[in-house]
Image: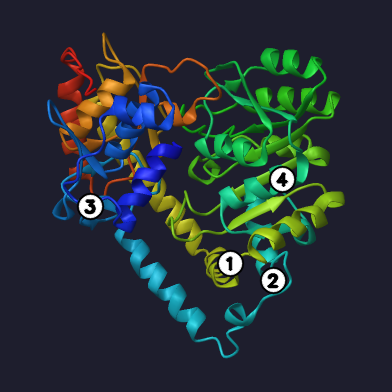
Amino acid sequence: MALANAIADAVESGDLTPGERLPARRDLAHALKVSVNTVSSAYQEAERRGYVQGEVGRGTFVRRRTEETFTYGHPAGLIDLSICRPAVIPDQMTAIRDVIRAAAEEPDLASMLACRPIIGLTEHRISASRWLYRLGMPADPNDIVITNGCSHGMFVALSAVVEPEDTVVTDSLTDHGIIALSSLLKFNLKPLATDDEGITPEAFAAAAAKGSVKALVTTPTLNNPSCTIMSAERREQIAAIAAEHDIAIIEDDVFSPLVEDSPPPLSSFNPDNSYYVTSLTKCTVPGLRVGYLVGPSRNTQRLVARVRTTSWMATPLAADLASRWIDDGTIDEIVAGQRRELAARQAIAASYLEDFETKSHPAGPNVWLMLPGEWRAEGFVRHAFQRGVVITPPEPFIVGRSAAPHAVRLSVGSVETRADLEQALEILREDLSQRPEPAFMDV
């Protein structure tokens, strides 16, 4: 990913200009002292993001500016199913304008003037406690830390719990943000075996028995990308193993508001050594980057210290907008709208992909598509891109050197309209129904 990021940065900065040919893979691999496969993967990722375009027999070129014009956050001409985000619903626009207008009309504009307390304004934490109670995670407002979204909350929690070289266990396929944090915080991330409910108790117990596991990180509701939901009974078993071996639980519960009658949070079964993180970005609108983090009371100040280090405090204005939606009930209407829209989109996906093996949830934002026949993920992602559809390969979710499954993630909320989704799915269905073409490498 580092090389792909470097290519993206070079294009954005103008160091690589439109139409410029990138070095041949073998030449660049020799210059950087890396494998040809590493360079090939980087070129493929840069192409998936829309920065370059491979042409058979000619090489890889920086995309022209006319191709880089972005609409709805996606490169023009591409249908992007690669971004896990809530769907856009027209009613949201009115709600957004109304809440911003209401905040602007406040006489003291406290949310714009605040720079303390670091933990978050008291009224925002009271609103957060109401929201968390409804999610099955009752919390004292004094123990709730406001963060800039779920990713920030996960960073704060992990940095408060683990030290470099500690062992942290997670699902065999896990959110790519956790994998990135393992590199940044220098802890050892180890995959655990999973089934249709997520991490198995047997795998967790075996790892815990070795005595070296510091924390468990998991998304038990709608795991990204596999879409699994852990049952209440399984959560109780996992929590009991963690308590027996004094292993901290760090739970990403960002998707649970989308699931009616979702099982109780995993953290609720072991609150004395759990760190519960949720956010509004996946169930309302992606720009409302407000997160809520609850840990053991004894460690609240450790969490606050890390918020201060990384952002001084979470953005009070965003927290204020979120609190207004929670307090006046608007959030219930928006979440219900998301459930309805995602259910409609999941039904569309199910109809187009009925002949293929998939995993999903009626109110979930993703579909995990198992590839048939001779298709491999790398080739299918490339082929879909060449036909104008962007999808997510499994590699970002793989822990360590585990084998990559022959599967891809489709995010149904990523496109603006249902018609866009149908167009993309029709293309993918056509591709899935055919055998892959022979692949050639530009060396």
Q: Which amino acid, mark 1?
A: Ala
Name the colour scheme: rainbow
Give the answer, above or below, for where 433 lies relative to 60.
Answer: above
Q: Which residue is mark 3?
A: 17
Q: Which mark is residue 121?
A: 2
Q: Which residue is mark 4?
A: 159
Q: Residue at x 35, y 26 (%)?
A: 408
- Say if residue 428 shows up in the picture: yes
Which residue sits furthest top? 373
- Front label number (3 vs 4): 3
Q: Which mark is residue 174?
A: none
- Label 3 near label 2: C-beta < 8 Å? no
Q: Secondary structure at mark 4?
A: helix
Crowd class of label 2 (few under 14; some 14 to 19; many from 20; radius 10 Å): many
Circle 2: residue type: Leu
| Location of residue 14 by image quarter | bottom left
Q: Is residue 284 left or right of residue 201?
A: left
Residue 192 image offset from top left, x and y in percent: 62, 19
**Numbered disc in front, either 2 or 4:** 4
Does the CB distance between marks 1 and 2 fall below 8 Å?
yes
Q: Nearer the viewer, residue 429 or 334?
A: 429
